[in-house]
Each structure stands twice: as structure tokens, then as C-alpha cells.
Amino acid sequence: MIAASAISYGTPLLFAALGELLAERSGVLNLGVEGMMLMGAVSGFWAVQTIGGPGWVVLLVAVLVAALVAAATSLIHAVLTISLRASQIVSGLALTIFAGASGLSSYVGHVASLGGQPARHEFAAIDVLGLKDLPIIGPILLHQNALTYLSWALVAVALFYLYRTRPGLHLRAVGESPATADAMGVNVTVYRYVHVMLGGALAGIGGAFFSLAITPGWLDGMTSGAGWIAIALVIFAFWRPELALVGAYLFGAFSSLGFTLQTRQVHLPPEVFSSLPYLMTIVVLVLVSTGWARQRLGAPASLGVPYVREER
Amino acid sequence: MVAAAALWLTYSRTRFGFEARVIGDSRAAAHYAGIRTRRKIVAVMALSGALAGIGGASEIGDFRHVLDPRGLQQASFGYAGIVVAALARLNPFAVVIVAILLGGLSNAGFSLQGATFPAGLVGTLQGLILFCALAGELLVHYRIRFVRRAAPLARAPEKFGAAGTTPSWW
């Protein structure tokens, strides 16, 4: 039970963290994840409510809309930080203010009066091969919704992309040393733009997971900090997709444990669990901050540094 | 404001502040000059934590009078604080001005909120203003030069010498 709900809370984290991971691998820190997730949540839900047609088509279109809208949101960050070389930290925070719980996503939601509407379609769990009643692995592995399976496929795709393809190699080069990559003939600007927007799209899908799967519907600020946890998760996972998968479900378990314990009358403040992801990230950071681990596992070397050709 | 003045005094007139600035500009140089960089960084971090704590306490003590962690989090003063510091280009006096401007903006939003003024527009406008301010930052580093023969408006590639006290990636 707990494992299954850990997966449903972990999946949006996984989407957002994979997206942020790609962006950070290209050297761009995007602190606007929370804002982009909320944009994805609101636009995905809006699409579900307005588009007609068979359920699965509507949901597919909704996810695409969420991804596109969030990618467009991240384009602001990309233009500001890559082309105009603004501070990535400030720009990302500004993006969250702009799109976040008291920003554009809330505005869109109120104007379209989405609040309180029951969802017309939602992502329901798929019973794979009719095996959902298998003990233990049944509910965990074989009874999830389509987006969760998509997220698992994305981890594999991201792994293959990063470590087995030429663009993936170039991406890592851009993140570690843009000057070298530039000399190699890699277009640093294009790579950064593409991956920031890919990151935005994935964050948008993660946000749509909230409004289409976890609690179908729309609420102001419904991601409730998942974007920030996703950013911590990228660090926790050392910028690796496979570890992001593990971390997402670990962090997902914390948030579901908080709720489960409350319903079982265990008197432990839920804040304990909501602070655990950050605590663990700090602990991991301290553990690996010395010696070889830093070299092997650390952040992309040019993370947060705008690339200016003329300053090479 | 007292804090801003005190901070400016510390940073511009005391050894502590000087050493902190040297560390910020070049850690290696600071180390070479015999400054205990690690200890100093911890001290500065603690100082900044203390200031942030005062900020949180003042919000509760002077303004809300209710201990409401959720509301405090939603107002997200912490993140806004980072934005303020960056827009003020890390100058304590400018921080006072920028903070009042940004605070006024959100406060105006709260009073405007009503049936005809949908929630969420405040953050949107605030974000737009921040984006414009950030985009304008580029012009601090570059000079617009009017060239008569070629394009009417061109950005001259040469940089101003020292960009001031800001670290290179701001």
C-alpha cells in the first residue's frame, strides 16, 4: 500500500527531476521548476476540460499541452539566462514568482474558473496483463497509470541519451566545459536552449500528473513544493537519471508516509516527513563533498555560469 | 534599515567585512593572504541566517501576530529575498529601496484583489517586472554605442573594466 502510493507521489518528482537534470547537465540551473509544474498542471487540466473526444485522446493531448505550455514558460528563463546572461538563480526564482501559486498559473485557473470542477477524464491505473493481484509486485509494478510507465521509459531513454549517443556526449561536454565544446564545433547556445525547454516540458508533465492523476482537479498551488523537492532530488541523485528514479520514490515515500501515519493515529508531525528530502540531500552533499567523490559525482562544472564566447 | 546601515559599515569599514569581500572575489587570494576562509564563510553564513531569522520574526511579531508556517511559506519571502539582494546588486542600501518597492507591489496586489481583479495577476506582474529588470542587467555590462555608418544601433563588444563588487556570474 505504502509502496504503491510512494510511486504515485514519486512520479511527478521523477518527471520534474529528469527535466531539471537535463537542463543542469547543459549548465543551466532552473529554479523555476515549481512555476513550470504549476503551469503544466493548470494547462493540462484546462485541456482535459475543454477538448472533446475519446478519453485517451483527450488525456494524450492534455499531456502534450501541459508539456508545450511549460516549455514555453521555460523559454523565458532560457532567453534571460542564455542570451541575455542574467543570473540563473534570480531568473529561476522570478520564473516561479511569475508562474507560481500566486502568479500566472493561478490567474489562468481563476479566469477559466477551473477550481472545484470535477475532472472529465483522469489517468487511471492500468492492469497490466491482468496481474494486479500478484502479491507485492502486482500493485507496485503492474498496476500503475500510463504516465508512470512513461516516466520509467524516460529514465531508460535519458540514460541511453546521456551516455550512449553523440548528442548526449555533447550535452555533457557543454555542461562541463562550454568553451571546449564550442571549440569542438558544438553549438552551446542551441544545446542549452533545447535542454532547458526539454526540462520545462518534463516539469510540465510532472505538474499535469498532479492535476490529472493524483488529485484530478485544479487548486491554487496544487504541486505544494514538489518543484523544490525535484531540484533537491537532482542534487541527491548526483545528476544521474537512474539515481533520480531511486530518489524520487524515496522522497515520494516520505510524503505518502506523512499522510498514512496521520490516518493511523501515529502522532508524528507531518512536517518531519516533508523536511526529510531536504535533510537527506544536505547529508548526502556533506558526505560526498570531499575527495574523489566530488570529482566523479559532482555537479556539471559550468553549472550556473553563463557562456560568453568573447570571455573565453 | 538599521541592519542595512550596520551591514554597510561592517562590509566597508571593518576587517571582517573586508575579508568577507576578498573571499567572495577570490577565495584563493584570500587564502594566500592568510585569511581563514572556511571559518570566515561559516561566520558569514551564520550572520546571514541570523538576519533572515529576524525577517521571519518581524513578519510574525509585527504584522501577522499568528504563528502560521504554511502562510509564511506561501508568501515565500525567502525566495523573494534572494531576488531583492540580486536586483540591489548586493548593495545594502539598494536592498532597502528594492525591498520596499517589491513589498509595495505585493501589498498593492493584496488590496486590489477582489471580484474584478483575479488572484494571480500580482505574481504575474511581479514576475514580468523582474524579467525586465533582469534583461536590463545586460545593459549594465555593455555600453550602447551609436555608430554612424553601419547599423544605427550596435552593442559595443568591449566591457567596462571592473564590473564592481558582483561575482562574475551574477
Image (cartoon, coloured by chain):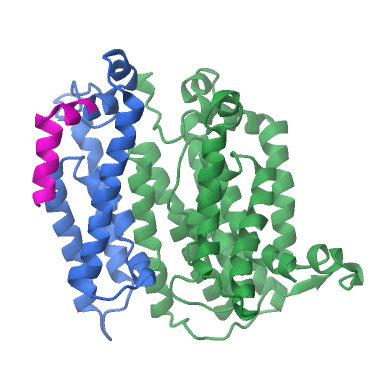
Chain colours: A green, B blue
Instruction: Pinpoint residue B77: horizontal percent, then vertical percent.
Output: 29, 60
Instruction: Pinpoint residue A249: horizontal percent, then vertical percent.
Output: 67, 57
Q: Could you tell me how many numbered marks the image carries?
A: 0
Q: Up-down: is B123 above or below A237?
A: below
Residue at screen point 37% across, 37% down = A83
Is residue A20 in view?
no
Residue at screen point 69% across, 72% down = A57
Q: Which residues are magenta?
A: B1-19
Please name whichever residue, A243 or B147, is drawn nearer the observer in this view of the structure: A243
Q: Quarter holding the N terminus of chain A?
A: bottom right
Residue at screen point 48% across, 35% down = A27
Instruction: Pinpoint residue A44: horizontal percent, then vertical percent.
Output: 55, 69
Q: Quarter holding the C terminus of chain A?
A: top left
Q: Is residue B15 magenta?
A: yes
Image-based side of B154 in relation to A310, left or right: left
- The main secondary structure of the magenta stretch is helix
Image-based side of A193 in relation to B130, left or right: right
Q: Residue furthest top?
A: B32
Please name whichever residue, A185 or B98, is drawn nearer the observer in this view of the structure: B98
Instruction: Pinpoint residue A230: horizontal percent, then vertical percent.
Output: 54, 53
Residue at screen point 53% across, 69% down = A270
Residue A99: name its quadrant: bottom left
Q: Up-down: is A277 above or below A221?
A: above
Image-based side of A49 in relation to B23, left or right: right
Is residue A112 in view?
yes
Q: Is residue B6 magenta?
A: yes
